[in-house]
Image (cartoon, rainbow, N blue to C red):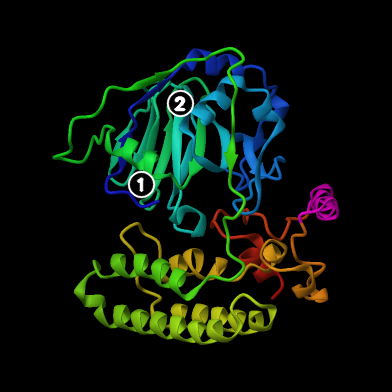
Amino acid sequence: MKLESEFVKLPLLFDAERLKEEIAQFSEDEWISHTTGFGGNLSIPLISLYGEFNDAMHGPMKPTPALERCEYVRQIITTFGEVFSRSRLMRLEPGFEVPPHVDINYHWFNRVRIHIPITTTEDVLFYCGDKYVHMAAGEAWIFNSWAEHTVKNNSDISRVHLVLDTTGSTRFWELVERGVWPFKAGRQPASEPIITLYEPNRPTHIRTETYNAPLVQSPGELEILIGALVRDIECLNASEEESKQAFLELTKDFVRAWREVWSEHGMKPTGWPLYHGLVKQADRAALTTSPELILESGIGVAQAFRSLVLSSAVNEEFAAQYLDKDEIPGTLEKTTRRFTAEQKQSQDSDEQTGQVARNTPCPCGSGERYKHCHGKIAKG
């Protein structure tokens, strides 16, 4: 999510020693490699699609068996009281880094990541834009994922963070306002941190996302997403004015055409081919009309447009969540996510044969699903 400043430290403190005890129970075999293959980056899913060991961003999220083994982590999540999406324990090995990247995609547009350090030293630094901080054990931080960011572990121990993804309620953002904004002048004094200690046998309740991707984006949602890109483009150099205007005209035409189809078909399958046609047309046009436009974060406008808007504009695999059974085309049987044991078996089969599941994040790190990225390229 794009924030007003690079970092905010929330007015919260947690028991890092208790958290260390809970992560110590996991064996080396339970830490899985990062889906992009980044060296030294490992994780244990705590909230994931179906509560299984995967890295998917969309679909019904459930607690994993690993979270069930972490009583204090469940208490922390309950204390926030938010609806959480994909959440994990994330480990960065000594001498490694999280490569510099920018999170401009549909998932991250409305979600923020809470970092709660568990094992760390002052030699572990988190960079965002041209600023950096050390996040101390037991603190809670959020950051501007719209800017380029990286983490460097210059220590001799493994850095482990509890990371929780959420859109955040009004209560959460009021909490953010009371936090420490280290790089934002003129802020009100931060509140005294609330300390949450471990309580044996304390009841917990984990709220998780179910509806987090539309079957078809509405015209209004498209305008909001595109508007975020347009505001960034308006800050670019005047020398790029012609390309800027070309992109603005392209997106206006795209939304107008989308609204025409929406007004007749809405989310119904009769409109899907038309929507897909508009997505392909807009993707080609963005690459043609604005190839040299680069956002301040270093991401090309055409790439950002694809990741943020086009890649999640139509999601037939979620048809079962939005349509009646008799409205779902029979031809969709092999590609839609059915939310059944049969679909799970299909995914398990893909994993066993080494194939990349079509709806999982692309291993290249683009933030797009495989079917929209390298899976699409592979198909020619």
Residue at which label 2 appears = 117
Tell me if I can see residue 40 in this picture.
no
The CA span between labels 1 and 2 is 17 Å
Residue at 64% of width from left, 29% of height from top?
67
How packed is label 2: few (under 14 Cα within 10 Å), some, or many (20 or more)? many
Q: Secondary structure at mark 1?
A: loop
Q: Is residue 246 left or right of residue 114?
A: left
Asked if residue 242 lies in the magenta stretch, the reply is: no
Q: Nearer the viewer, residue 104 or 255?
A: 255
**Helix, strand or loop under label 2:** strand
Q: Which residue is mark 1?
A: 144
Residue 351, position in %: x, y? 79, 49
Q: Please, is residue 55 above or below residue 368 in the view?
A: above
Give the tally of numbered discs. 2
Note whether residue 357 is visible.
Answer: yes
Instruction: Work out whether residue 221 or residue 5 is closer to the camera in this orientation and state it.
Output: 221
On screen, residue 93 above or below 253: above
Magenta segment, which residues?
Answer: 339-354
Q: Quadrant of the C terminus?
A: bottom right
* Percent x, y of residue 323: 70, 68
For residue 62, which quarter of the picture? Answer: top right
* Picture layout, residue 164 above or below residue 95: below
CA neighbours of label 1 inside 10 A, class few (<14), some (14 to 19), many (20+): many
Residue at figure coordinates x 70%, y 40% from the top left: 51
* Mark 1 or mark 2, earlier in chain: 2
Q: Is residue 259 left or right of residue 298?
A: right
Amino acid tagged 2: Pro
Residue depicted at x 60% and y 71%: 314
Q: Identify the main secondary structure in magenta.
A: helix
Residue 365 x %, y %: 55, 53
Q: Amino acid at mark 1?
A: Asn
Residue farthest to the left, as pictured? 186
